[in-house]
Amino acid sequence: MSNQTHSAVSPADVAAVSPTLAAFTGSAIVNNLWQRQGLSTHDRCVITVAALIARAQTAGMAHYFNKAMDNGVSAEEMSEIVLHMAFYAGWSNAFNAVIILKDIFAERGIDAAKLPVLHPEPLPLAQALPDNDFFMGLIDQNIRPFAPGLADFSTDLLYHHVWQRPGLSVRDRNLISITALIVQGLRDFLGVYMARGIQQGISRTEMGEVITHLAFYAGWPTVIPCIAAVQQAYDAQ
């Protein structure tokens, strides 16, 4: 692969600045965090990709995008994660990922024929959005009276197009949505998305590992305040 798809920071670079950080990167992240039980490697890859995009952390993108694809995350899934994150972290943050991922796709021989189409056969609404009525009610009550345009984009484009796209499992869409909220510190929305994620089978043990994992990529002060909302969602079941 070209240098464009290698990590922007080498272990030697880190050691030249902070030998202790270099040691912790190997011992705590590579040899411990990524080997922990309770969360699959696929899930760890997916949430890491989503977290980097949501936080515009471009330095780690090439390394972790390749790691994700090397561990079975398909080009279709990567494409859909970028699309999904555009809505949950903003278009410009998604474009940061596009700049990196287009070169990785080129290196791997992935062209448009291997990527999701604009209008695939949508997943049934009851499968993709079993709580559709609840969310439509929230939009009508809290968004539509003041910003009807945003309400229309939310219902027609986000929920009734993106969330029904089959290129990413419903569970993974919930997982990366929760990830985006956590790494951006958006606790106000976390409860309702956690209820949806729990319905899709994301277990308490898995979420404990999600939070543990994301602490290394978003920082302890960002993730720890989210624990209360996550725990409350499980306690309410």
Image (cartoon, rainbow, N blue to C red):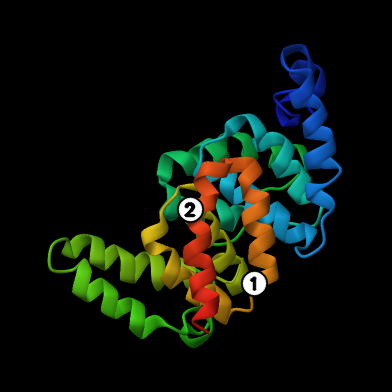
Comparing 84 with 38, the one in front is 38
| Badge 2 vs badge 1, beta-carbon distance below 8 Å | no
Q: Please name which of the two marks, 2 or 1, marks the residue nearer to the observer.
A: 2
Q: Single out the residue that lies furthest toward the top.
A: 16
For image coordinates 73% across by 36% down, the residue present is 63
Report helix, strand or loop for mark 1: helix
Residue 121 visible (yes or no): no
In whole angstroms, how far apart are the C-alphas of marks 2 and 1?
17 Å
Measured along the vertical axis of the image, is residue 119 above or below residue 88?
Answer: below
User: Residue under circle 2?
Assistant: 225
User: Residue under circle 1?
Assistant: 204
For image coordinates 81% across by 53% down, the residue present is 71
Report helix, strand or loop for mark 2: helix
Measured along the vertical axis of the image, is residue 193 above or below residue 26?
Answer: below
| x and y percentages locating residue 224 in the rendered image | 54, 51
Quarter of the picture holding the N terminus: top right
| x and y percentages locating residue 8 in the rendered image | 69, 24
| x and y percentages locating residue 236 in the rendered image | 49, 81
Q: Amino acid at mark 2?
A: Pro
